Amino acid sequence: MRPRLRLFTGEDTAVCSEPNVTVRLSEISQVLADAVNWDRTWLSDFADDEIQISSDLYEILSACRHLRPSA
């Protein structure tokens, strides 16, 4: 996918939402893991964004969060 460039003219423009993109978890898991390990700043830019995941993945993630030993 080619990046779309936008020209900023200083005028208020209506905010149009970007289209959603569907990806497999395997496509982004390593990138996200590296971003967490290296404390990449860009990751915090998206910290408040909502994502949609399947209910079974949510159950597994919730269970893992409760099983992790505390430091």
Image (tube, helix red, strand yellow):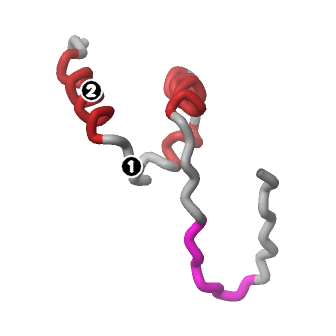
**Label total for image:** 2
For the point 58% across and 78% down, which residue is it? 15
Q: Which residues are magenta?
A: 10-18
Q: Residue 11 colored magenta?
A: yes
Residue 12 in which image quadrant? bottom right
The percent coordinates of residue 16 (x first, y second) are: 59, 76
Rendered view: 7 above or below 2: below
Residue 40 in which image quadrant? top right
The percent coordinates of residue 47 (x first, y second) are: 43, 46
Any part of residue 61 in sight = yes
Instruction: Look at the numbered disc 1 and give the secondary structure of its residue.
Output: loop
User: What's under tag 1, amino acid-wise?
Assistant: Gln
For the point 55% across and 48% down, which residue is it? 22
Rendered view: 36 above or below 42: above
For the point 55% across and 58% down, which residue is it? 20
Left or right, 58 with respect to 22, comes to left
39 or 20: nearer the viewer: 20
Instruction: Look at the numbered disc 2 and give the secondary structure of its residue.
Output: helix
Residue 71 in which image quadrant? top left
User: What's under tag 2, amino acid-wise?
Assistant: Ile
For the point 59% across and 29% down, which residue is it? 31
Q: Which mark is residue 40?
A: none
Rendered view: 55 above or below 30: below
Q: Answer few, some or many: residues within 10 Å of disc 1's Cα (few below 14, many 20 plus, some between 14 and 19).
A: few
67 or 27: nearer the viewer: 27
CA distance separating discs 2 and 1: 15 Å
Q: Which mark is residue 52?
A: 1
The percent coordinates of residue 37 (x first, y second) are: 52, 21
Q: Answer few, some or many: residues within 10 Å of disc 2's Cα (few below 14, many 20 plus, some between 14 and 19).
A: few
Point out the tag, 2 or 1, that comes first from the N-terminus: 1
Q: Which mark is residue 60?
A: 2
